Amino acid sequence: MEIRVEEVAAEELKEKPAGDALGFGQIFTDHLFKMKYTEGVGWHDASIEKYQNFSLDPSAMALHYGQAIFEGLKAYRGKNDEIYLFRPKANLERMNKSAARMCMPQFDMDDVFAALKELLKLEKGWIPSTQGASLYIRPTMIATEAGLGVRPAHEYLFFIILTPVGAYYPEGFNPVKIFVTDKYVRAVQGGVGNVKTAGNYAASIMAAVEAQKQGYTQVLWLDAVERRYIEEVGTMNIFFKINNEVITPPLSGSILPGVTRDSVLQLIRDWGLKVSERQITIDEVMEASGSGSLQEVFGTGTAAVISPVGSLYYKGQQIEVNGGETGELAQRLFAELQDIQYGKREEPHGWVVPLS
Ligand SMILES: *Cc1c(COP(=O)(O)O)cnc(C)c1O
C-alpha cells in the first residue's frame, strides 16, 4: 500500500506537554493516518497528514446508524529509548472481526501495521518517557457514505490517532469501587457485546453516570437474561480469586475478548496457578465474601492494565475485597505486564514488538 506523507511544517508543530501533565485522551499528536474505502474500489488514498478536523456530510451513515468501530493499544518507551508495541496484531485482528460483525470492510493487517509503524516513527517524539506513561493508539473506522436508510454503507474512513497518556495510577495503585447493576444490561448473546463498536459505549453511559453519582467508579455488568452471571466492567474484563482459584467469565459472545485478559490468563497459567474460564454468578462472589474465601478482584484492560477492585456494591450490600487493599496477584500481574510492555523482561510469548 502506498502512503502519501505530508509532514506538518516544523513551525506548526504543537508544543509537547510535560510528562506529568498528560491525563488521558485530551492531547493529540501532530499527525494522523487515514485511508478511504469505496465499494468496488477497495481501500485507497492512504495518507499520513496533519491531525485536523474531518469534513463529513451531515447524513454520513455512521452518525445515524452507528457503523463505527475502534481499537485501543499502546506504544511504550523502554530502555535505550527503544519503542515497544504490545501484541499489536491481536488488536488489528480484533478490529477486523469487529468490522465483519458490523458489515464494514476488512483491511489488510500487514498494510495497516506498516502504516501504524510509519506514523509512530514520525511521532516518536510524542511517546513519553515518564514511568507508567505511554502513547495510546486509537485506530477507528466509520461509515462516511452520505444518505439515510439502514444498510451497510458503501464508503468508509479508517484513521489512526495518537494521544500521549500519563500513568494510570499517578498516586499509586489504588483499588476502585464497583457498582454491580441489576437494572441495566450491556449486551446479550447474538448482539454486539463482543465487538468494539461505538454504540456499546453509548448504551453504557447512563449506568455509569448513576453509579458515579453514588460514589462508584465503574459498573459491573451481569448477563442480560438472568442477571446473575458476571460479564465484565466498563472497559475491562474481570477476574476473581476465590479459594486460590482464579476465575474469569468465558468468552460467551457478550463480553469483549480483551488482549489484557488473554495475557493475564497466559501468565497465570505460566505461574502454575489454578485458573478457570467459567461462569460465575454475583451470588457466588457475595457468598465467598461472606465466608471469607474471596481473596481478590481485579479488572484488566489496555488503559489501566490491571485495576484492583476494593469494594463491590450489589443490591443494597457493600462488600470489601481484601480489606480494600490491592491483592498480591494483582500487584504481581501489574508489575510483570509493565515490565514486559516496557521491554524490561524477556518473555517467551512474542508479545512485544520493537518499533525499529
Ligand atoms: C477494550 C475493552 C476491554 C479490554 O480489552 P483490552 O484488549 O484488554 O484493552 C474490555 N471490555 C470492553 C467492553 C472493552 O471495550
Image (tube, rainbow, N blue to C red):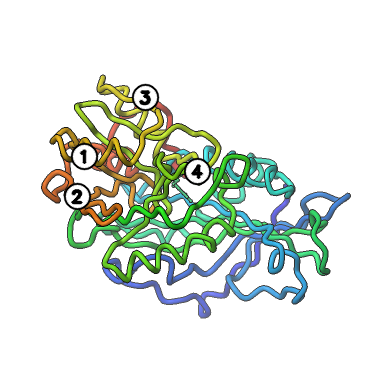
Tell me which numbered mark, 2 or 3, is placed earlier along the sequence: 2
Tell me which numbered mark, 3 or 1, is placed earlier along the sequence: 1
Tell me which numbered mark, 2 or 1, is placed earlier along the sequence: 1
- Local SS, label 3: loop
* Mark carried by residue 323: none
Coordinates of residue 127 in the picture (x, y in percent): 39, 58
Q: Which residue is mark 2?
A: 319
Q: Residue furthest top?
A: 272
- Local SS, label 4: loop
Q: Which residue is mark 1?
A: 296
In three-dimensional space, the C-alpha distance between marks 4 and 3, rounded to whole angstroms, equals: 25 Å
* Left or right position of 146 against 284: right
Coordinates of residue 157 in the picture (x, y in percent): 71, 60
Q: Nearer the viewer, mark 3 or mark 1?
A: 1
In three-dimensional space, the C-alpha distance between marks 2 and 3, rounded to whole angstroms, equals: 38 Å
Q: Which residue is mark 4?
A: 256
Q: In the depicted view, which residue is nearer to us: 347 or 237?
A: 237
Q: Is mark 4 within 8 Å of ligand 1?
A: yes
Q: Is residue 307 above or below residue 283?
A: below
